[in-house]
Amino acid sequence: MSGTDQGRREASAEIPWHERPNVTVQVAALIIGVSSGKVYDLAGRGDLNLVTLAGRTLVTVHSLCRFVDSAVPHDPNNSRAAGAARRRMAAHADVARDAVLAGGR
């Protein structure tokens, strides 16, 4: 590793991400806990702003903070898993009801 690379790594390690103007797509993905592809999806939806600087695609920290601040508390009753469980229970109830009705004929 060259001295320039070492100095750049040390300087970037000293500056907290939220104090930088931009972060890489990979760093943004780590911060919000998603894949790099999802970061591009979020940018496509307008949730994150991407910029190009020196040939690199970066996420503006302002848009990243705004996105993180838009998070809502998790409600386990409204999760996809809870919805799927309710649908499975309803399907089982339908099968049981149909079996009872078929046996009564």
Image: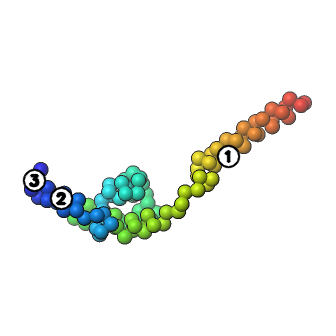
Who comes first in sequence, dot 1 or dot 3?
3
Question: Given the image, on which type of amino acid does mark 2 rest?
Answer: Glu
Q: Residue at x 89, y 31 (%)?
A: 104
Q: Are marks 1 and 3 in contact (CB under 8 Å)?
A: no
Who comes first in sequence, dot 2 or dot 1?
2
- Disc 2 secondary structure class: helix
Q: How is this picture coloured?
A: rainbow
Q: Which residue is mark 2?
A: 10
Who comes first in sequence, dot 2 or dot 3?
3
Image quadrant for the C terminus? top right
Distance from disc 1 to disc 3, alpha carbons, whole Å, reads: 58 Å
Q: Residue at x 14, y 59 (%)?
A: 7
Q: Residue at x 49, y 63 (%)?
A: 71
Q: Which residue is mark 1?
A: 86
Distance from disc 2 to disc 1, alpha carbons, whole Å, reads: 51 Å
Question: Given the image, on which type of amino acid does mark 3 rest?
Answer: Ser
Which corner quadrant of the image does residue 50 belong to?
bottom left
Residue 2, which numbered label?
Answer: 3
Q: Residue at x 14, y 56 (%)?
A: 5
Which corner quadrant of the image does residue 58 belong to?
bottom left
